[in-house]
Structure formats: structure tokens, C-alpha cells
Image (cartoon, grey):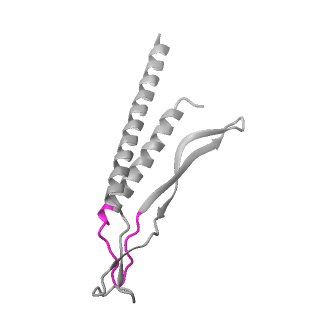
Amino acid sequence: MGIFNGLTINASGLALERLKLDTISSNIANVNTNQTQTTAAYQKKSILFSENLKNSREGTPTTYGVKVTGIAADETEKLTYDPTNPAANAEGYVGQSNVDIADEMVAMLQAVRTYEANVSASEMNKTILKKALEISKG
């Protein structure tokens, strides 16, 4: 494991949490984007990620933080009865956005707290590296 791996891991976590916050913001912005005659209702998006493993020289897997593996749309249908709407289906139902604002606010708070934790860990890594440099000066 290299001297800068801690910073690399923190940077990947910061990038992931920023993407999560961007996705949550998009979900909140589209909470009222319902079905029209030409477009479908907005579907909630979420980030898929996994651990970023790479093989070291010894052949053992080493972690390099996290990586985004995709963005998934929640295809759960949310319908409301409105037979007067021109976008209504044969039964009179219209598709609505499946975003729950309360769930998004909780996810946003969690992403912000995780981002803050990554910033703190990054600052601690920088402090450790500075102390190591001071020791080498004598």
C-alpha cells in the first residue's frame, strides 16, 4: 500500500458522495414531473457503486476506494386517478413521479454526513503526511 492510498480512497468517497448529492438534487427537482401526452413520469434515480479493487504486485487485491458502477432508475409506477387529464390511460390513471421527498431529504442528510466524514479523514491523512515530512527533516 502506497503512501497516498489513503488520500485516493478519500477522494473516491468524496466524488461518490458528490454524485449522490447531484442525483438527489435531480430527484427533488423532478418531484412534480408527471406524465404528459408525450413523456413518461419522472423515475427516481439512485447511484450504484462497489469497492474499487486492483491486484497488487503480490497478486492480492488492494482497495482503491469506491467506484460508480451505474445509475439506476426506480421503475415503480405511481398512478393517480384523473380521467380528465389528456395523458390519462384507458382506465383514467395518470403516471406521477415516484420520488418521495422525505426519503430524498434523509438520503441527502446521509450523503452530506458521509461527505463530511471523508473530508475529515482526508484532513487527517494530510496531517499524518505533514508529520512524516517533519520527522524526515530531523
Judge from the rendering whether residue 63 lies leftward or rightward of residue 113; answer left or right. right
Q: In this view, does 8 lie above or below 27?
A: above
Q: Give the range drawn in magenta.
A: 28-44
Q: In this view, does 2 lie above or below 72?
A: above
Main SS of the magenta part reads loop
**Residue 81: image x %, image y %?**
33, 80
Magenta stretch encompasses residue 61 = no
Q: Which residue is rendered at x = 38% and y = 58% of the image?
A: 23
Q: In this view, does 112 lie above or below 82?
A: above
Q: Which residue is rendered at x = 41% and y = 53% of the image?
A: 19
Along the line of sight, which residue is nearer the eye, 137 or 124?
Answer: 124
Along the line of sight, which residue is nearer the eye, 85 or 41?
Answer: 85
Q: Which residue is rendered at x = 50% and y = 38% of the image?
A: 8
Along the line of sight, which residue is nearer the eye, 22 or 98?
Answer: 98
Along the line of sight, which residue is nearer the eye, 12 or 90?
Answer: 90
Q: Which residue is rendered at x = 35% and y = 86% of the image?
A: 92
The answer to which image quadrant residue 40 occupies is bottom left
| Residue at the extreme top | 138
Judge from the rendering whether residue 54 lies leftward or rightward of residue 131; answer left or right. right
**Residue 2: image x %, image y %?**
57, 31
**Residue 32: image x %, image y %?**
29, 69
| Residue at the extreme bottom | 90
| Residue at the extreme left | 84
Q: In which quarter of the image is the N terminus?
A: top right
Q: Is residue 81 above or below residue 22?
A: below
**Residue 60: image x %, image y %?**
69, 37
Magenta stretch encompasses residue 41 = yes
The answer to which image quadrant residue 37 occupies is bottom left
